[in-house]
């Protein structure tokens, strides 16, 4: 990857970083506003709690993206940007274009996703539950016969 392209990516990352920091700051201010609202009505309090949860979740995503950006910026500095962390091969430019902070090549990412979310048929999950709690199975057939 040439220096000019890297510089462009760096600019884009830094721009996004500034935007995310602004968003996080806004959310924190909003959260502070919700928390400082003291309402005797428990319903309002529930809504406020829900809002805080929502904001915290949103903040989580942004913080994660911010982490990815920091990692990508560090990689540009040490010259490893665009390399797959798992197999060391070069990540295709089209993929980096779509996901500027990509850390894995398409192949390794697909493999990671397959491990994290195995496409296991539902019955295997059922059997695992039965293994852990055999009482799930006991009596199940009998009851059906009675009816
Ligand atoms: Zn890879």
Image (tube, rainbow, N blue to C red):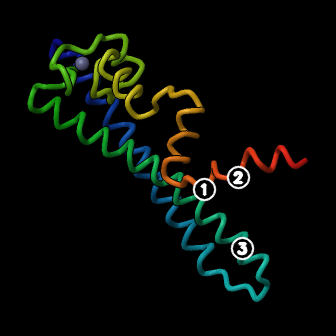
Q: Residues within 10 Å of mark 2 (few under 14, many from 20)?
A: few
Position of 69 relative to 85 (above/below)? below
Assess whether mark 2 and mark 1 are in contact (beta carbons under 8 angstroms). Answer: yes
Q: Residues within 10 Å of mark 1 (few under 14, many from 20)?
A: few
Q: In which quadrant of this rendering is ligand 1 seen?
A: top left
Quadrant of res 94 = top left
Residue at the spot 73% in from the left edge and 69% down from the top edge: 47
Residue 6 point in image, percent of width and height: 21, 21
Assess whether mark 1 and mark 3 are in contact (beta carbons under 8 angstroms). Answer: no
Name which of mark 3 and mark 1 comes first in the sequence: 3
User: Element under label 3?
Assistant: helix
From the image, state whether disc 3 or disc 1 is nearer to you.
Answer: 1
Mark 1 and mark 2: span between their CA atoms? 8 Å
Mark 3 and mark 2: span between their CA atoms? 41 Å
* Residue behind label 3 places its C-beta within 8 angstroms of ligand 1: no
| Depth order, front residue of 26/40 | 40
The residue that label 1 is drawn on is 135
Specify whether 97 is left or right of 40. Answer: left
The residue that label 2 is drawn on is 139
Residue at the spot 37% in from the left edge and 30% down from the top edge: 115
Name which of mark 3 and mark 2 comes first in the sequence: 3
* Residue behind label 1 places its C-beta within 8 angstroms of ligand 1: no
Q: Which mark is residue 46?
A: 3
């Amino acid at each position: 990857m040439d220096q000019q392209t890297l510089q462009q990516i760096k600019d884009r990352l830094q721009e996004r970083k500034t935007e995310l920091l602004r968003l996080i700051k806004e959310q924190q201010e909003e959260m502070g506003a919700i928390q400082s609202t003291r309402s005797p009505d428990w319903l309002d309090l529930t809504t406020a709690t829900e809002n805080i949860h929502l904001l915290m979740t949103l903040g989580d995503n942004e913080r994660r993206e911010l982490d990815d950006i920091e990692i990508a910026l560090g990689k540009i500095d040490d010259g490893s940007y665009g390399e797959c962390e798992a197999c060391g091969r070069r990540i295709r430019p089209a993929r980096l274009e779509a996901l500027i902070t990509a850390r894995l090549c398409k192949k390794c990412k697909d493999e990671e996703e397959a491990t994290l979310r195995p496409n296991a048929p539902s019955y295997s999950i059922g059997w695992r539950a039965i293994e852990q709690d055999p009482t799930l199975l006991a009596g199940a057939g009998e009851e059906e016969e009675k009816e």
